[in-house]
Amino acid sequence: MSEIETFVTHLECSETGQHYPADTRHNLSDKGKPLLVRYDLAGIGNALQKDRLSARAAELWRYREFLPIRHGENITRLGEVITPLLGSPAIQQALGCGEILIKDEGRLPTGSFKARGVAVAVSMAKELGIKRMAMPTNGNAGAALAAYCSAAGIESFVFCPDDTPEVNIKEIAFQGAHTFLVNGLINDCGRIVSEGVERMQWFDTSTLKEPYRIEGKKTMGLELAEQCHWELPDVILYPTGGGTGLIGMWKAFQELAAIGWIGERLPRMVAVQSSGCAPIVQAFEAGNDHAEFWPNAHTVAAGIRVPAAIGDFLILRAIRESNGFATAVDDEDILLAQRECARTEGIMLCPEGAATLAALKKEVVRGRIATSERVVLFNCASGLKYPLPKAGKHLDIRQPVDYAKLT
């Protein structure tokens, strides 16, 4: 494949604005903060018209001018489709709300939105000559890393808390990663990864400790804008652990606004967490720019069980710049919302996705989301990747079936 017309100018420290050269390996800035990829946005605007996108393949890479890959042969594809926006008329009617749409990221490779960030991160790793990658994970990111690294010929090491859902652990190992269970939380796994960089010579691919997973997650915002015909919704509810997706979407909206593809009115970004692990909610309500470590973190929504996020200030910045907020919901309400959506809409939300529905119900009652507002919920993975309650009633073929008792 030939070279791709790209518009990356440099990387930038998200706290100080210090510039770093593109096309070289980087983790955090000198200040220990995430690096952001910056583009010649005027150049993108001059080179590409938004109505040209529809003629391209319905995949993540249709937004290549907004992405950092320079050489097409390094793109690692596993089928990163455009994920659907699903209506939820029964829930909408029950809540008396305006339009409620569910962006179903479970249709992506490895069944979750983690494929977006990892697809770009692994493609860039291949471009930069990286041969070994490692990350901590609560499940889905590790599965994506294992799959994309196997496809790219890169060795992968994945470290999971030992109570990570078993289906995720098996998937990670089956896809080819060296897989380890750790008797701690994801931050403990992250410490193992960071402390092993020099000895193991792996590239630390932890959330926001490299610049490119944000760029992959950014495509959620680009895709949503195109699906909405460049008229964005009023509110986006997003399940927030490390926050890469929320940060990435906000970055996408700012870039689109800068080149004139969307208007000045941007969605209110709502970070949704579990009441058992809600450091961003606590920091938002206290008016702080950074979150404190959340002790004894626990929730049925494993993907948002992140007691400390290195990008906490970026999450909080996006929330406040968008006039959004952060909210927490109880595990009981998450499970109820998951069941409700399955039984009324036929949509199998993962627990993290169900948290956004539980939050919507809570915030409509509180009045922080108006019933007139158009809302998008993000379902970040297939609900089939998580444990489900036991089900099914036994029938004995040796006995007559009592059909009156089947309902």
Image (tube, grey):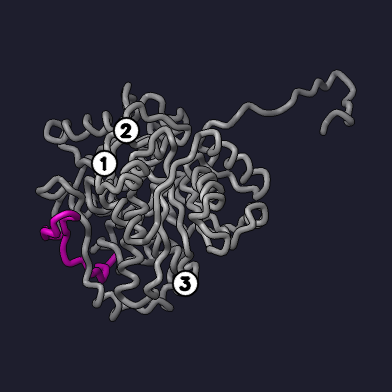
Percent coordinates x, y for residue 43 in the rendering: 24, 77
Q: Which amino acid does the dot numbered 3 rest on? A: Glu
Q: Which amino acid does the dot numbered 1 rest on? A: Ser
User: Gap between marks 3 and 1, in whole Å?
Assistant: 33 Å
Q: Is residue 207 left or right of residue 115?
A: left
| Residue at the (45%, 46%) spot, across then down | 112
Taking depth in this image into account, of 318 and 386 the one nearest to the observer is 318
| Residue at the (16%, 59%) spot, across then down | 12
Taking depth in this image into account, of 299 and 226 the one nearest to the observer is 299
- Given the current orientation, which residue lies at the most extreme top position? 398
Comes first in the chain, label 3 or label 1: 1
What residue does disc 1 label?
206
User: Badge 1: how crowded within 10 Å, few (<14), some, or many (20+)?
Assistant: many
User: Gap between marks 2 and 1, in whole Å?
Assistant: 19 Å
With respect to residue 6, does 298 lie above or below? above
- Image quadrant in which you'd find residue 223: bottom left
- For the C terminus, the quadrant is top right
What residue does disc 3 label?
231
Q: What label sits on residue 294 in the rendered view?
A: 2
Which numbered mark, 2 or 1, is in the foreground of this view?
2
- Given the current orientation, which residue lies at the most extreme bottom position? 46
Which numbered mark, 3 or 1, is in the foreground of this view?
3
Comes first in the chain, label 3 or label 2: 3
